[in-house]
Each structure stands twice: as C-alpha cells, then as structure tokens.
Image (spheres, rainbow, N blue to C red):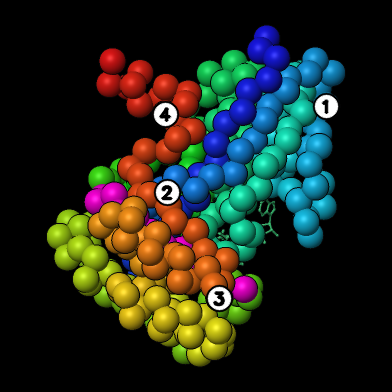
Amino acid sequence: MIASLTLPAPAKLNRMLHIVGRREDGYHSLQTLFQIIDLCDHITFTPRHDGEIHLTSEVSGVDHDDNLIVRAARLLQQYSGSHLGITLDVEKRLPMGGGLGGGSSNAATVLVGLNHIWQLGLSLNALAELGLQLGADVPVFVHGHTAWAEGVGEQLTPVTLDAPWFVIIHPGISVSTPSVFQDPQLTRDSRPITMARALQGGAPEWRNDCEAVVKKRYPPIAEALDWLGQYAPSRLTGTGACLFAAFQTQQAAQAIAHLSAKRWPTWVAHGLNTSPLHDDLGYFTKALGR
Ligand SMILES: C[C@@](CO)(OP(=O)(O)O)[C@H](O)COP(=O)(O)OP(=O)(O)OC[C@H]1O[C@@H](n2ccc(N)nc2=O)[C@H](O)[C@@H]1O
Ligand SMILES: Nc1ncnc2c1ncn2[C@@H]1O[C@H](COP(=O)(O)OP(=O)(O)O)[C@@H](O)[C@H]1O
C-alpha cells in the first residue's frame, strides 16, 4: 500500500444558472454550466489498516464529524464494506460557502481518491450517486468534467467550454443559500432551453437567476458586481457570495485582480474542461487509450 498521496480538489464556477422550476420536495430544478477551474484545495491521504477515519486538519467552523471530507470517507467505507481506514489532511484555499463548491469538491476527491487507494473498483457513476447524498454539486466533481447540468445538478452532460482566465472576487460576506431559494422574488420559472442553445448563445447571453435576489439582499455583492462589471461582464457563481468575470489572457486578468485585491480577497484562475484530480489519476488518458 502507498505511504501517502496528495490529490487536488478543484473549484467550479457556474458560467450560467437558470432556475426552471420547483420540485415537490421544495428543491429547485436548475439548468447550469459548471466549469471546473484550476483553483484547488489539496487533500493528503495516508492509508491505515485499523479501519479508522481521521481528519487531522481543522476546518474553521466545521466540526470533525460534520466535515464533508469525513462524511464522504465514512459513507464510502460503509457502502463498500472496506475494513481499511485513512488519515486525511486538507490544505484549504477555497473560501467556504462562496459558491465555488469547495466542500462538495473535497467530498468528491475523497470518494475518488479512496476508491483508488482502497482498490474498490467502483465506477464514477456509482461514486457520483453516492456523492449526491452529500450535496448537489458533488457529482460534477466526481465525474471530473466541465458539464451542462439539469435537475438539481446531478443530470450531467460533459461539454467543452472556452478556457478563459477568471478574476474571482469574494465580497467578504456570506450568503445563506436557503434564504435565496426561499425568497418570493426569486425567478424560478425561466423557460427551459436546450443544451445546444445554451452553448450556442455563449457568454453574452448567460445569466444567473439568483443574482437579482442576492443583489437586493446583500448590497456589498451588488457593489462588487458593479465594480467588476466596469471591466468585463460580471456574474455570481451559484448563490454567491463569489462573483467572477472572464478575460482572454492571464495578464489581463491579473491587471484587474491587482486593482480588486485592494478592496476584496481576489483570485485569478484558469478555466478547465477536465479536473486536475482525474488528470492526476490518469482517468482521461486511460479512457482515450493513450
Ligand atoms: C445552487 C448551487 C449551484 O452550484 O449553489 P452553490 O451551493 O454552488 O452556491 C448548488 O447546486 C446548491 O447545492 P447544495 O450546495 O447542495 O445546496 P444546499 O446548500 O444543500 O441547499 C440549501 C438549501 O437551498 C435550497 N435549494 C438548494 C439547491 C437547489 N437546487 N434548490 C433549492 O431549493 C434547499 O432549500 C436547500 O435545503
Ligand atoms: N471540507 C469542507 N470544506 C468546505 N465546507 C465544508 C466542508 N465540510 C463541510 N462544509 C460545510 O459546507 C458548506 C458549503 O461549502 P462549500 O461547498 O465550500 O460552499 P458552496 O456550496 O457555497 O460552494 C460550508 O459553509 C461548510 O459549513
């Protein structure tokens, strides 16, 4: 068995997000384009034979047993019946609850990483189905490809998007996802469009239906969106609080990030079509027979 292995857990941006309905269980049906980006947390896996699961790093505000990293490992151990254990350590870089999907991505990296380390031989489909119990955004990270998503985000079709450089701003406040989805003024009846239409229209037509409600409830987010919008079309990711704009070159993105960093935590990240997790584990090269 390996001594230890470190794997990335990348973030995502919702390049567009339409809300097309509300299900009987209260959850909203979405149409969204998830793009994986190269901004990552890193998780180190050290196998153990005693069946125990431990996370050695503190994640502020999250109890050990509630951490999605621990919950994902326990879920997989239970599902597979494996008697092996793991010590996990996370180096967090992604802001929590910012719409970048960090917690979901951490869970996905644990599922995919442990499937490899414990040699379980489960398919990505099986892992994604398991991951959906932990959060709606887990499946896209398990499959590891930029994707068009419907349902609550679990019906995925891999797509290839342009790969711009993004300026991502965290306006320094947190958004309550339930309060956005419960707001009576939320647009929840957007007309469903086809995936082809979404891809054809491209960036100029993309929007996030959560944005109006989030701007109304959180003025600092409206302010940051307006500020970034001076330089390029700016949009919210998920329900926020992070927002982003796309630039053709790294240099252009860095110039704006330099200005933004004077007011807000800011990152520059590159758009990807495949997850660095899957690249590291050789999924896509294997699938292509290379
Ligand atoms: C809307 C997205 C887009 O990526 O936002 P972000 O979390 O990334 O910001 C996600 O799918 C979010 O999924 P997930 O992260 O699992 O949502 P949760 O925090 O569990 O949702 C909190 C609450 O929001 C509501 N909710 C969430 C997702 C959804 N499709 N419809 C809903 O109505 C539900 O009331 C739920 O109890
Ligand atoms: N390992 C983890 N990393 C981040 N958040 C976690 C983790 N485990 C549990 N959480 C909880 O999940 C929530 C959502 O996290 P995250 O996926 O980063 O945000 P979002 O869904 O807005 O993109 C956090 O606010 C936190 O309470």
Query: How many numbered markers are drawn?
Result: 4
Give the class, few, some or many, for how many residues have Cα within 10 Å of label 3's Cα (few <14, many ≥20): few
Residue 95 drawn at (x, y percent): 61, 59
Ligand 2 near label 3 (Cβ, under 8 Å)? Answer: no
What is the distance, in whole Å, between disc 3 and disc 1 at their CAs?
44 Å
Amino acid at pointer 2:
Ile
The residue where tag 4 is placed is 279
The residue where tag 3 is placed is 263
Task: Residue at 73%, 23% (x, y): give it.
Answer: 46
What is the distance, in whole Å, between disc 2 and disc 1 at their CAs?
32 Å
Vertical side of 92 occupied by 18: above or below: below
Image quadrant assignment for residue 173: bottom right
Q: Nearer the viewer, mark 3 or mark 1?
A: 3
Which numbered disc, 2 or 4, marks the residue that appears first in the sequence?
2
Give the class, few, some or many, for how many residues have Cα within 10 Å of label 1's Cα (few <14, many ≥20): some
Magenta-colored stretch includes residue 170? yes
Amino acid at pointer 3:
Arg
- In the image, is 60 to the left or to the right of 247? right
Which numbered disc, 3 or 2, marks the residue that appears first in the sequence?
2
Amino acid at pointer 1:
Glu
Residue 105 drawn at (x, y percent): 55, 46
The residue where tag 1 is placed is 52
